[in-house]
Image: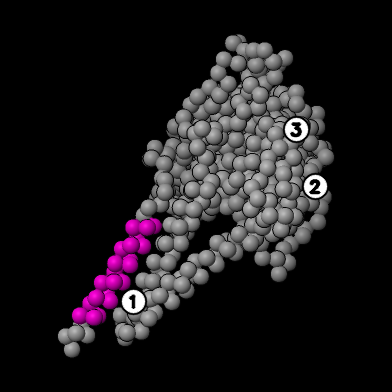
């Protein structure tokens, strides 16, 4: 098994000597309507206001026709107009953002499922102690009334890694919460262990507890959750305010922090500085001599694209090169008091694997000198118990594993070697109630042309109704 240390101590020893994190519980006040910053709060309300606004516009055009009719025909036309507005706004929105934010292959987009990232640069026979494989998954959402299981290809995919890193969205809780909160029963820990083959005795889980739902149930439950996880065999946790990072085998530093908190509480989870996108906690052990992994809870929910600002931040964090924004973006950032230019940094990360979006986002390679680095903007949902609302969106994820080994000529500097990744899907069975994580063999769903097709069909139906009514009027 890999050796995990925090501040020079074995991870279990550290938590035993630092058993709880003090801090206050700051609950969201009644008038606080969003966990996001000012810019994203505006975006959030724009998304939800756009649909009714366009519905009103469509109704303004259709109501004059509807007033010619009476009874059931008028009701049908109004209802169909509302439905049509839903599909056309989604179509237009996806079209705009696909055009604006799509990453191309010549910009570093990764499409191959298996490839050597730094081909020819690795030492031919690195020491076993300096050759490491690490796996990543995205969000582990609450399973509701489902058991979590893993298909055999998922187990085989992670069979040769030393650590699997995942984000436990929310916490283990001794009390049930409302639908907007995320809590897991203790049984989830036993179910996570089932990802290991019977012959696999070395691989461990490392779960991040720094996310926007970590503080849903207050400090006491947060500490209870961390202690239960740390007591479970082959499962460890990080992301408490004093543990934003864990050192693996003295060579690999992995750091987690959250960009958001639903309860506006940063007293006991690791946080990002919104201007530097770097963890604020004083225990950060970032070192250029180590291989530095960033595992951030960042970005925005339900967005399969990567915004320009987030892409530029990833480039800056991996390459150290400062990034400029367009004139429009500069004016927007000035309005919300954000820097016009993301200044370069001497603290350059080697690998970024993000989470929080709940949907898949692209993987991109970025050059730093003669070395290639990697960012997976979001792993989506690795596990989710949804079955009705959002069930077609929140059941998809990305898993990835990377070989980490020293350069042949680099004074022992560690870099990424072979990379492998797969798309995943959660499949549900009713009896017994389970969600099984599978490799998704279906073709990646692209632009939602179905929205436009449905919109056109509805408009044709409205015109047909109008035609029928006119025909009936002429017969009278």
The structure residue drawn at horizontal position 33% and vertical position 67%, both measured from the top left corner, is: 459
Crowd tier of the residue under label 2, counting other residues whose Cα lies within 10 Å: few below 14, some 14–19, many 20 or above: some
Mark 3 → mark 2, Cα distance in angstroms? 27 Å
Residue indicated by mark 1: 76
Q: Position of residue 22 (x, y in %)?
A: 82, 50
Is any part of residue 223 visible from this angle?
Answer: no
Crowd tier of the residue under label 3, counting other residues whose Cα lies within 10 Å: few below 14, some 14–19, many 20 or above: some
- State the SS at label 3: loop
Residue indicated by mark 2: 21
- The magenta segment is 451-471
Contact (Cβ within 8 Å) of mark 3 with mark 1: no
Which corner quadrant of the image does residue 2 belong to?
Answer: top right
Q: Is residue 319 above or below residue 26?
A: above
The structure residue drawn at horizontal position 57% and vertical position 37%, both measured from the top left corner, is: 376
Q: Position of residue 435 (x, y in %)?
A: 46, 46
Q: Which mark is residue 347?
A: 3
- Does the magenta-highlighted stretch encompass residue 296? no
- State the SS at label 2: loop
Q: Sequence order check: which comes first, mark 3 or mark 2?
A: 2
Q: Quadrant of the N terminus?
A: top right
- State the SS at label 1: helix
The residue lying toward the viewer, choosing from 231 and 389, is: 389
Residue reaching furthest to the top: 125
Q: Position of residue 387 (x, y in %)?
A: 45, 55
């Amino acid at each position: 098994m890999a050796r995990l240390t925090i501040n020079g101590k074995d991870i279990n020893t550290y938590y035993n000597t630092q058993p709880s994190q003090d801090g206050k519980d700051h609950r969201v006040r009644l008038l606080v309507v969003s966990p996001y910053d000012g810019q994203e709060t505006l975006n959030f309300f724009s998304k939800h206001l756009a649909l009714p606004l366009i519905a009103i516009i469509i109704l303004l055009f259709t109501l004059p026709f509807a007033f010619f009719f009476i009874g059931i025909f008028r009701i049908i036309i109004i209802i169909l107009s509302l439905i049509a507005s839903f599909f056309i706004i989604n179509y237009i929105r996806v079209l705009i953002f696909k055009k604006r934010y799509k990453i191309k292959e010549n910009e570093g987009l990764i499409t191959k499922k298996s490839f050597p990232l730094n081909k020819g640069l690795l030492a031919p026979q690195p020491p076993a102690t300096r050759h490491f494989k690490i796996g990543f998954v995205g969000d582990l959402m609450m399973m509701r009334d489902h058991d979590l299981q893993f298909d055999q290809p998922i187990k085989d995919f992670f069979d040769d890694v030393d650590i699997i890193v995942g984000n436990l969205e929310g916490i283990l809780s001794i009390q049930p919460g409302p639908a907007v909160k995320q809590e897991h029963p203790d049984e989830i820990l036993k179910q996570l262990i089932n990802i290991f083959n019977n012959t696999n005795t070395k691989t461990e889980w490392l779960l991040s507890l720094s996310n926007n739902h970590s503080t849903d149930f207050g400090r006491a439950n947060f500490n209870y959750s961390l202690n239960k996880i740390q007591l479970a065999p082959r499962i460890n946790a990080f992301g408490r305010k004093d543990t934003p990072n864990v050192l693996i085998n003295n060579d690999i530093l992995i750091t987690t922090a959250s960009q958001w908190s639903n309860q506006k509480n940063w007293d006991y989870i690791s946080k990002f500085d919104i201007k530097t996108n770097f963890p604020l906690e004083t225990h950060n052990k970032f070192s250029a001599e180590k291989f530095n992994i960033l595992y951030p809870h960042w970005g925005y929910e339900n967005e399969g694209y990567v915004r320009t600002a987030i892409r530029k931040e990833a480039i800056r964090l991996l390459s150290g090169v400062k990034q400029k924004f367009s004139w429009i973006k500069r004016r927007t950032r000035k309005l919300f008091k954000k820097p016009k230019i993301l200044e370069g940094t001497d603290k350059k990360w080697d690998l970024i694997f993000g989470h929080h979006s709940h949907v898949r986002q692209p993987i991109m390679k970025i050059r730093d000198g003669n070395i290639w680095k990697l960012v997976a903007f979001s792993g989506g949902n690795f596990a989710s118990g949804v079955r009705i609302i959002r069930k077609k969106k929140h059941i998809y994820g990305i898993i990835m594993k990377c070989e980490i080994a020293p350069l042949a000529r680099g004074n022992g500097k560690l870099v990424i070697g072979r990379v492998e990744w797969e798309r995943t899907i959660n499949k549900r069975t009713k009896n017994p109630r389970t969600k099984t994580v599978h490799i998704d063999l279906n073709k990646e769903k692209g632009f939602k042309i179905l929205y436009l097709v449905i919109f056109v069909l509805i408009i044709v139906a409205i015109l047909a109704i109008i035609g029928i009514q006119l025909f009936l009027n002429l017969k009278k």
